[in-house]
Amino acid sequence: MSVEMPLWAQLVVALLLVCSGLLVLISATGLVLLQDFFQRMHPPAIAYTLGSWCVALAGMVCFSVIESGPALHPGLISILLAFSVPVTTVLLARASLFRRRAAGIEGTPPPLSAPAGSASEVESPVASRP
Amino acid sequence: MSSLLSGACTFALGSYAVASVVVVARLIGGPRAQDRVLALDLLYLHGMLAMLVLGIRYQSDIYFEGALLIALFGFVSSSALAKFLLRGEVME
């Protein structure tokens, strides 16, 4: 079922695929070269956003041209990643913070310890609202 | 399939393979457990992107569903591992 695509679609898809490959390589290199865990959490974001969007756009263009109609289902994966990746990242950052405090590693930020009185003052207008 | 498109697909798949090898280096040598979880999460992403590129290469919709499943399982497993690191157990 190999349908020949027009040249402009081939160029767009090829360019997006090459871009995504280069971006994924950059993010993997950053993951290995950076020194600290909290610095190391940043390079995967390149692959999660730009890399996956490049492939999803390439898929959209490719399937839209082949089926000669709008085919937007590859974008579903990017939307799913946009919802799921921040959850994982925040959970992992909190776990790392917790474990570094437990291990007593230097340079870990201390916990935010607001006094109980000020916290209840901030909370009270919201709580007493009818 | 033209040679331009198949060359681009081969380049993308090759760079995913190289990136996965680099990430496996972090997975094996990562100093702490959270580095390993991060590397595993990125490996899931590389597998999912490879499935999408294969779908473009062979012009088939089946690969898309596999990529969607890999994305879902990657989210569930990574968040479960992060939760385990945070609390020492996954469910209470």
Image: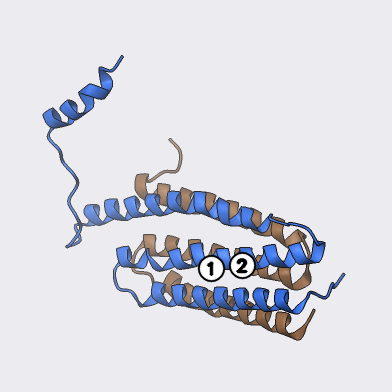
| Residue found 31% across the figure and 67% down from its top | A39
Which residue sits at x=56%, y=63%? A53
Location of residue A96 by image quarter: bottom left
In which chain is the residue bearing label 1?
A: A
- Relative vertical location of residue B4 with respect to residue A114 in this rendering, above or below: below
User: Residue A101: horizontal and vertical position, in percent?
Assistant: 22, 53
Indicate the secondary structure of the residue bearing disc 1: helix
Of residues A6 and B61, the one nearer the viewer is: A6
Residue identified by numbered label 1: A51
Disc 2 to disc 1, C-alpha distance? 7 Å
Chain to which mark 2 belongs: A
Q: Which chain is brown?
A: B
| A38, above or below B28, in the image | above
Q: Secondary structure at mark 2?
A: helix
Quarter in which the C terminus of chain B is drawn: top left
Instruction: Name the disc covering residue A55, or none.
Output: 2
Q: What amino acid is at disc 2?
A: Val
Q: Tell me where residue A13 appears, x and y as whole percent.
A: 67, 73
Q: Is residue A4 left or right of residue A43?
A: right
Q: Could you say which chain is coloured blue in the image?
A: A
Q: Amino acid at mark 1?
A: Gly
Considering every residue shown, the one lying at the far right of the view is A1
Answer whether labels 2 and 1 touch (C-beta < 8 Å).
yes
Residue B3 drawn above or below residue B27: below
